[in-house]
Amino acid sequence: MSLNGADQDPFEQIERAILQIGWLGQRQFMQLLADERFDLTVPQFHTLLHLTYCEGECNMSDLARSTHQSAASLTGVVDRLLEKQLVARGRPEGDRRQVVVSATERGRALLQTIKRARREEMRTALAHIQPSELSELQRLLDAVLEGMLRVVELNGHHGPGNHG
């Protein structure tokens, strides 16, 4: 077997490329969030992002469920976001036991800045690809995603422990 993978199964090479792209994309994203302009962790980013999907306020239990965090972890994340003035916390009039959180204007603006920075990084990463090839790359990536989603759905219906 050669070191450059020329003798390998093309599906193995594609799988390796997809895994590397995923890993590098995650690493690049974490580095971007850690930049002093943003100073966010991934859980802080996802919490703030989810809050922008909520109509106005979101209660902590729904937020924990939708961001896949424990209530204790989420409380710490929200505390950090409060310190940075990216979210506001309060209690609804009807039920003072509930705690609700919302994104502040500053939080929403920061998300837009992060989005622009991510887009700029992607432009830089793909600058060596000809514009005419970008649409073909998009078409192929969409086809890969469609196929991977199909496999995930099949495994969900016929996977281990699912006898349906």
Image (tube, rainbow, N blue to C red):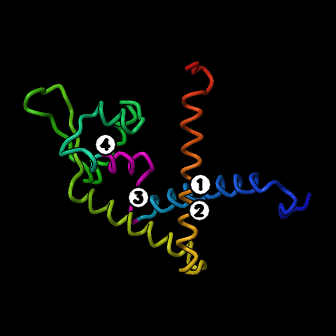
Residue type for callout 3: Asp
Residue type for callout 1: Val
Q: Is residue 39 magenta?
A: yes
Q: Secondary structure at mark 4?
A: helix
Q: Which mark is residue 144?
A: 1
Q: Which mark is residue 39?
A: 3
Instruction: Identify the magenta region.
Output: 37-50
Considering depth in this image, is 131 or 56 the residue closer to the camera? 131
Residue that numbered label 2 is attached to: 140
Is 15 displayed left or right of 77 in the figure? right
Residue that numbered label 4 is attached to: 79
- Expressed as whole percent of the image width and height from the top left, the position of residue 66 reads 36, 37
Circle 2/circle 1 CB separation < 8 Å:
yes
Q: Secondary structure at mark 2?
A: helix
Tell me which label, 1 or 4, sits earlier in the chain: 4
Cα separation, mark 2 vs mark 1, equals 6 Å
Circle 2/circle 4 CB separation < 8 Å:
no
Q: Going 46% across and 59% down the picture, which residue do you hit?
A: 34
Q: Going 31% across and 37% down the picture, which residue do you hit?
A: 63
- Expressed as whole percent of the image width and height from the top left, the position of residue 22 reads 59, 54
Residue type for callout 4: Asp
Q: Quadrant of residue 90?
A: top left
Residue, far right: 1
Q: Going 55% across and 55% down the picture, which residue do you hit?
A: 26
